[in-house]
Amino acid sequence: MQNKFFPEIKNKFGFGLMRLPLLDAEDTTAIDIEQMKKMVDLFIERGFNYFDTAHPYHKTCSETAVKAALTSRYSRDQYILTNKLSQTFFETEEEVRPLIESQLEACGVEYFDFLLMHAQNKTNFEKYKKCRAYEIGFELKKEGKVKHVGLSFHDTADVLDNILTTYPEVEVVQLQFNYFDYESDTVQSRKCYEVCEKHGKPVIVMEPIRGGNLIKLPDDAEELVKAAGIGKAELAIRYAASFDNIMMVLSGMHCIEDMDMNTAFMADFKPLSDEEMALAAKVAECIKSKMVVPCTGCRYCVDGCPMQISIPDLFTCLNSNNMFKDWPSKAYYSARTAGKGKASDCVACGQCEGVCPQNLKIIDLLKDVAAAFEQ
């Protein structure tokens, strides 16, 4: 099935290359290339061709993994490759083009099908404007090194409206969009989606399972989904894909089993029924009544932490402890702080809050983590 927005894309389900299989769970650069090759093969075999990476993913190793598992093994017409221009890797206009060209080389391709301005928000948009990043992207499109220019976004709907008004040439927008965040005051999935509709821009979905949070459901939500006879991942991914203006739904699958499961139900995609949509809304309410921290585990907060606190992992502990009140949460906390910073080690420098796409009050939340596990 061809994509209704871009006919070169097959179906509307993509392989997000942010959470790849690892040989060592503690080393995000140790990508299991052999398992990744099997995942790529199965993905293409089942009729999909859209791959999404970014320079920061796996500390820049996602791009070289793309070359090893995909671009060196398949002809260029067999896949669609999206990459992103990330603000932490350039400071001046002069650095933008060489960075993108280095990314092309790392991925082993002569052009990107889609180049996205990465993680746009009110603050970093000013940097992109100052460095003429969008203009350079449009120039690269004219040169054939980029087929389409878009953006990924983490902020409020009014900020998105301003960006699309400033740069109407933008072709696609990547949004965090799932049934939990649909009416969120922080993420504003619905409002941002409606801005895209207003500007005539198709939407690429990231975090349809919200970093795995829509798989790890509390007991009452789990029973609702089980009674309906639908898988948790299936409910979340098909929910996102059921909206008319959705061009693509990405999933950051980290093992061959996830790839097998997700491609099975998306190969012959069917939108959720009215009853299934109502189920998703009920499950969201169950989660909201128990979840303390709506963290997606993007890990943008981790690299610059002076105390080496694995912040998303500690928030996972807190959410798990709140939902399930189980001993593994405490054991997991001990494991994740062994040889690293504890929540109480936070020096409140604010670096983490400055890069958090969810605008979380991380400093205060770490105090909650410390209270739950260190007393």
Image: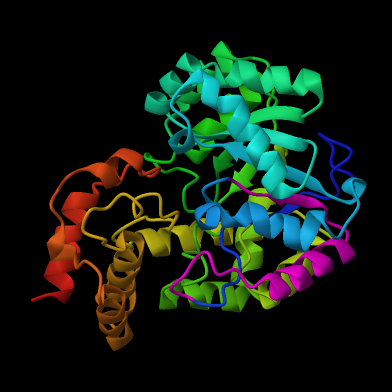
Farthest residue toward the top? 166
Vertical arrangement, residue 346 with respect to residue 94, above or below? below
- Picture coordinates of residue 89, whole percent (x, y): 48, 37
Vertical arrangement, residue 226 with respect to residue 167, above or below? below
Residue sitting at x 71%, y 43%? 105
Horizontal side of residue 169 vs 339, given as left or right = right
Residue sitting at x 41%, y 43%? 184
Quarter of the figure with residue 33:
bottom right
Horizontal side of residue 307 vs 40, given as left or right = left
Q: Range of the magenta residues?
A: 25-54
Q: In which quadrant will I find the C terminus?
A: bottom left
Residue sitting at x 16%, y 57%? 346
Badge count: 0
| Between 354 and 110, the one nearer to me in the picture | 110
Horizontal side of residue 50 vs 229, given as left or right = right
Colouring chosen for the image of the structure: rainbow
Vertical arrangement, residue 159 with respect to residue 102, above or below? above
- Picture coordinates of residue 134, whole percent (x, y): 59, 20
Farthest residue toward the left? 375
Query: Does the magenta portion include 66?
Result: no
- Picture coordinates of residue 171, whole percent (x, y): 70, 25
Query: Does the image show residue 252?
Result: yes
- Picture coordinates of residue 271, whole percent (x, y): 74, 53
Farthest residue toward the bottom? 327
Query: Does the image show residue 173?
Result: no
Query: Does the magenta portion include 45?
Result: yes
| Between 111 and 234, the one nearer to me in the picture | 111
| Between 21 and 204, the one nearer to me in the picture | 21
Vertical arrangement, residue 122 with respect to residue 203, above or below? above
| Between 282 and 153, the one nearer to me in the picture | 153
